[in-house]
Image (spheres, rainbow, N blue to C red):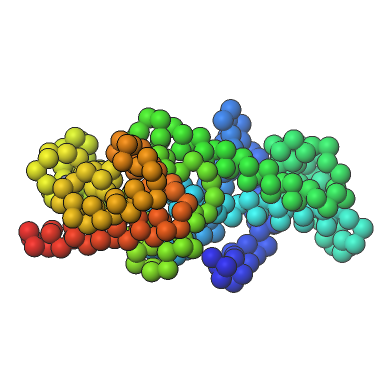
């Protein structure tokens, strides 16, 4: 990610202060529930940013964008564009602005004042949207404030989407929403050294795996019929069944659960769902490594079984 930020991102955002404007004539900006990400939806540089994050995490391109951003704690690149644009505005309106640029800037201001849409319309729109209408153009903190407010707004919208998925238990993020309620980079990305184990764990957490609960989604099979093929319990093969219930993994699970019980006194008294939430949202490094290794072993056993059956 460091490499991306220092080699690819500067290329992607080259001259973004000019091209990264908001279309203030668009009907999107007039919507009651408008948020800045609506204006920057499907931005090519953000698509490439997500593609790079998915590559780094080792998940496929269909993995949910919200989960990928949530795991890495990365905000979309349009937020950097906003900061660059406001910073550029400050440069253009300052005394050191080159003559030709200054003329173009004044032209843009005049166009806006005469009711025409121009580059300045976008700047005014952003400042107005962030309650910075009366800002002083010389205040050096303004670009930072714009970025900070845009990030807060993005995080708030992201959290709302998580809350809806978690409460209603619908969509691809229903399980992820159970264990993720803070937008920040996950500790396990730094703790788990083995890239195969780490990407397997990421796939499991964000439901980018091949368990029946997900495979059935693409075939439009009702959830109650996405049954586990590893046992005869007649249960849906979702993440909780796979990790804590399915008898197929009893042998490796008994060793794993003993380790969990050693780390948490009340662990055995929790129900399966609470155990699942506890294990996947825990920040204990030892437990993270143990859990990721256990999930990795279970998926290998599952793959072995399916290969034997076929
Ligand atoms: Zn099962």
Front-most of residues 39 and 10? 10
**Does 186 sit left or right of 296 as displayed?**
right
Q: Position of residue 167 (x, y in %)?
A: 40, 30
Residue 2 visible in rendering: yes
Q: Is residue 142 left or right of residue 273?
A: right
202 left or right, relative to 12: left
- Whole-percent x and y of residue 149? 68, 43
Left or right, 103 with reference to 226: right
Q: Residue 121, can we see it? A: no
Residue found 47% across the figure and 51% down from its top: 283
Residue at the limit of the structure toward the right, as seen here: 95
The residue depicted at 66 percent of the width and 58 percent of the height is 16
Q: Which residue of the protein is positioned furthest toward the top in this rendering?
A: 32
Which quadrant of the figure contains the C terminus?
bottom left
Q: Position of residue 171 (x, y in %)?
A: 35, 38
> Residue at the location (52% across, 43% down)?
182
| Residue at image coords 49%, 54% | 186
Q: Quadrant of the N terminus?
A: bottom right
- 56 or 122, nearer to the observer: 56
Q: Give coordinates of residue 107: x percent, y percent.
A: 82, 50
């Amino acid at each position: 990610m460091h490499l991306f930020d220092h080699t690819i991102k500067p290329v992607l955002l080259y001259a973004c202060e000019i091209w990264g404007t908001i279309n203030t004539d668009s009907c999107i900006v007039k919507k009651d529930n408008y948020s800045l990400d609506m204006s920057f939806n499907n931005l090519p540089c953000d698509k490439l940013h997500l593609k790079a994050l998915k590559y780094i995490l080792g998940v496929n391109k269909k993995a949910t964008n919200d989960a990928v951003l949530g795991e890495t704690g990365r905000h979309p690149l349009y937020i950097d564009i906003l900061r660059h644009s406001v910073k550029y505005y400050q440069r253009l309106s300052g005394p050191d602005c080159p003559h030709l640029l200054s003329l173009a800037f004044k032209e843009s201001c005049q166009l806006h004042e005469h009711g025409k849409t121009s580059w300045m319309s976008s700047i005014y729109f952003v400042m107005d949207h962030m309650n910075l209408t009366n800002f002083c153009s010389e205040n050096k903190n303004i670009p930072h404030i714009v970025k900070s407010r845009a990030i807060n707004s993005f995080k708030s919208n992201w959290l709302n989407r998580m809350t809806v998925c978690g409460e209603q238990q619908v969509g691809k993020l229903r399980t992820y929403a159970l264990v993720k309620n803070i937008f920040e980079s996950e500790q396990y990305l730094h703790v788990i050294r083995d890239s195969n184990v780490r990407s397997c764990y990421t796939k499991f957490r964000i439901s980018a795996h091949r368990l029946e609960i997900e495979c059935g989604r693409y075939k439009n099979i009702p959830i109650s019929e996405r049954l586990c093929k590893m046992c005869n319990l007649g249960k849906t093969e979702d993440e909780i069944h796979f990790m804590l219930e399915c008898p197929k993994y009893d042998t490796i699970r008994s060793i794993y659960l003993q380790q969990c019980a050693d780390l948490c006194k009340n662990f055995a008294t929790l129900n399966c769902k609470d155990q699942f939430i506890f294990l996947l949202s825990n920040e204990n490094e030892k437990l993270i490594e143990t859990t990721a290794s256990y999930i990795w072993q279970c998926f290998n056993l599952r793959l072995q079984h399916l290969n034997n059956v076929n």
